[in-house]
């Protein structure tokens, strides 16, 4: 399905198929502006409630032989604890960061999966404010650890490798400050936001476009509409994989940055 085909369905008076816009990601449910209660904020609150319920329900009667729910919870926890925190941060310091990393992974994963789970069908992380908020938490923890470990002056001094010519030190220091305090947090937030935004936009395009062609199109366009629904199904499967991957990448990078702040050479 192409935008050209859909555009050909528009009528002379400007009617016809309307492609999805960024307004699809705002959707205020009550009020408007900064104090609005939006679909994204409701989805976030719902995810927190569901995660809390699930963790309590699957762990309050923990047994040596786990139930299916306990097995899933322990599997996710073990994956983050051993496969991310311990492997990246190291066996000496990793335990105190496991709650943060596990919470971030589960929160991001559930909110990403909301994008393909009815009746929500809205990826919360497609609203840039949520990835930014999580990134701020990561960077407050990351820089606080480094400053407390070596002191503020030494922390900034270690941004520049030793042995460089004096004349190049200011330029390197400037570039490192940009990297550590601007580039890294921006890319961490934008990577998660961009993938969730683009994936949801594509799904909207194929689903709404297919629906329009099936209802309003000629016989040939109805066939194209059916193909559009098939593509939507394929993209949904692919999107689920991306949603898992993005939750993992965000958590992995958070662990990597924390490990860097604990390294002796930092």
Image (spheres, grey):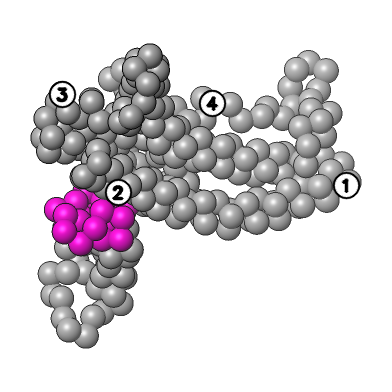
| Disc 2 element | helix
Query: In the picture provided, is 78 more to the left or to the right than 211?
Result: left
Q: Secondary structure at mark 1?
A: helix
Q: Is residue 78 above or below residue 263?
A: below
- The answer for how far apart the CA atoms under marks 3 and 2 are is 24 Å
Residue labelled with disc 4: 22
Which of disc 2 and disc 3 is earlier in sequence? 3
> Whole-Å distance between the Cαs marked 4 and 3?
44 Å
- The nearer-to-camera label among 1 and 3 is 3
Tell me if I can see residue 241 in this picture: yes
Which label number is shown at residue 153? 3
Q: Is residue 77 above or below residue 240?
A: below
- Residue closest to the eye, 116 or 177: 177
Category of crowding for the residue at label 2, using alpha-carbon neighbours closer than 10 angstroms: few (below 14), some (14–19), many (at least 20):
many
Which residue is label 2 attached to?
A: 255
Residue 18: x and y in percent read 68, 27
Residue contact at pointers 2 and 1, CB within 8 angstroms: no
Mark-to-mark CA distance, 1 and 3: 72 Å
Residue 95 sits inside the magenta stretch: yes
- The answer to whether 174 appears left or right of 200 in the picture is left
Depth order, front residue of 144/210? 144
Residue 27 in view of the camera: no
């Amino acid at each position: 399905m192409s935008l050209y085909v859909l555009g050909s369905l528009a009528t002379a008076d400007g009617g016809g198929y309307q492609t999805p816009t960024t307004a699809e990601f705002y959707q205020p449910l009550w009020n408007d502006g900064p104090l609005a209660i939006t679909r994204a904020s409701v989805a976030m609150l719902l995810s927190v409630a569901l995660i809390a319920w699930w963790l309590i329900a699957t762990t309050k009667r923990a047994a040596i032989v786990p139930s299916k729910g306990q097995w899933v919870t322990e599997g996710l926890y073990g994956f983050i604890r051993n496969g991310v925190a311990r492997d990246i941060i190291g066996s000496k310091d990793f335990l105190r960061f496991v709650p943060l990393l596990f919470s971030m992974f589960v929160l991001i994963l559930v909110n990403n999966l909301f994008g393909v789970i009815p009746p929500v069908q809205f990826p919360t992380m497609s609203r840039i404010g949520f990835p930014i908020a999580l990134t701020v938490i990561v960077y407050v923890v990351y820089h606080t650890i480094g400053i407390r470990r070596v002191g503020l002056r030494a922390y900034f001094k270690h941004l520049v490798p030793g042995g460089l010519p004096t004349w190049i030190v200011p330029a390197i220091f400037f570039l490192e400050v940009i990297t550590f305090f601007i580039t890294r947090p921006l890319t961490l937030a934008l990577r998660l936001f961009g993938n969730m935004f683009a994936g949801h936009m594509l799904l909207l395009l194929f689903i709404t476009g297919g629906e329009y062609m099936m209802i309003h199109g000629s016989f040939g366009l109805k066939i194209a509409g059916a193909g559009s629904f098939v593509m939507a199904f394929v993209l949904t499967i692919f999107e689920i994989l991306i949603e898992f991957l993005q939750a993992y990448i965000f958590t992995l990078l958070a662990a990597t940055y924390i490990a860097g702040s604990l390294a002796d050479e930092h």
